[in-house]
Image (cartoon, grey):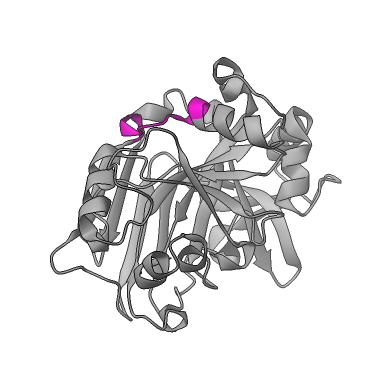
Amino acid sequence: MRLVTFSDEKGVRIGVHEPASATVVDLSATTRLPRDMTAFVALGKNGLQRARRALKSGEGRLSIASVRLLAPFPRPAKNILCVGKNYHDHAREFQASGVDATGKEAIPEVPIIFTKWPNSVIGPGVPIPIANDYTDTTDYEGELTVVIGDGGRNIAGKDACDHVYGYTIVNDVSARTLQNRHRQWFLGKSLDGYCPMGPCILTADEVKDVGAMRLTTRVNGEVRQDALVSELIFDIPTLIETLSRAMTLEPGDLIATGTCAGVGIGFDPPKYLSKGDVVAVTIEPIGTLENPVG
């Protein structure tokens, strides 16, 4: 299922997007399901079963054109967990850029973890507010993002997939000068509006081989990034195992798994984003997350 958060004149709620019919099924129309995605994810399999029954009923069906898609988690309950330098080619291009302040090694020995502030999240189609970056060094980073379902601590890698609820897309927009100047990544990654997310959560049962998914980022139609998820240095089970050794993961937690080569800072001279640009991150079968730069 493609779970979405959407709004119309009746307010914000969650639903299931069915691309074939260009419709969204409002899950609040015939059930007492939550209107909030984090609360819905916490229901686990029970919530998904109830959603499937709502689909079969045929009630609450709306034209996709009549609603506005928001980020699946418009305001996540916690910071988005992120992984730096997690594709070999990107790790090398990032070290060569001069922006990297994490250490001398190009390829990390263990996952590099940072977070993005919840207020940075915006939905599909919402302009990335480039004016918030007073250094004029705004860059893009398309990333596959894991949505945690069943939470836990000390999750073994062999069991990690059982804790994955689904997948979405994040554009880890970054102010490169701030990222380097402060010798850590939080400020440069957490500007308001610097975390486009969406367009949906694709539930894990729809993905047979996560490594076979291809991440492609286009800027104004030009392909900048193109890689398979299988090229991750630290795969999803390793990330979940690593994080859960230090903290309890909970339903609705988000893990952005890292970006591949082709970011703006990797070019000579750098290709930073400018007002009027359009950034589109595609990971099939999740879809495309597209945002203009405003």
Residue 108 image offset from top left, x and y in percent: 36, 38
Screen quadrant of the C terminus: bottom left
Residue 71 image offset from top left, x and y in percent: 58, 59
The quadrant holding residue 249 is top right
Screen quadrant of the N terminus: top right
- Give the residue displayed 70% in from the left and 53% down from the top: 14
Magenta region includes residue 235: yes
Magenta region includes residue 264: no
Q: Is residue 171 left or right of residue 103?
A: right
Q: In this view, does 231 lie to the left or right of 203?
A: left
Vertical order, 178 against 166 (above or below): below
Residue 188 image offset from top left, x and y in percent: 45, 67
The quadrant holding residue 148 is top right
Looking at the image, which is closer to me, 46 or 136? 136
- Give the residue displayed 78% in from the left and 46% down from the top: 39
**Residue 281 makes an appearance in the image:** yes
Furthest-front residue in view?
Answer: 104
Q: In this view, does 119 lie to the left or right of 108?
A: right
Residue 283 image offset from top left, x and y in percent: 38, 44
Furthest-left residue in view?
Answer: 268
- Give the residue displayed 42% in from the left and 79% down from the top: 133
Which residues lie in the magenta part?
A: 229-238
The quadrant holding residue 119 is bottom right
Helix, strand or loop: magenta stretch? helix
Furthest-right residue in view?
Answer: 32
Looking at the image, which is closer to me, 142 or 290? 142
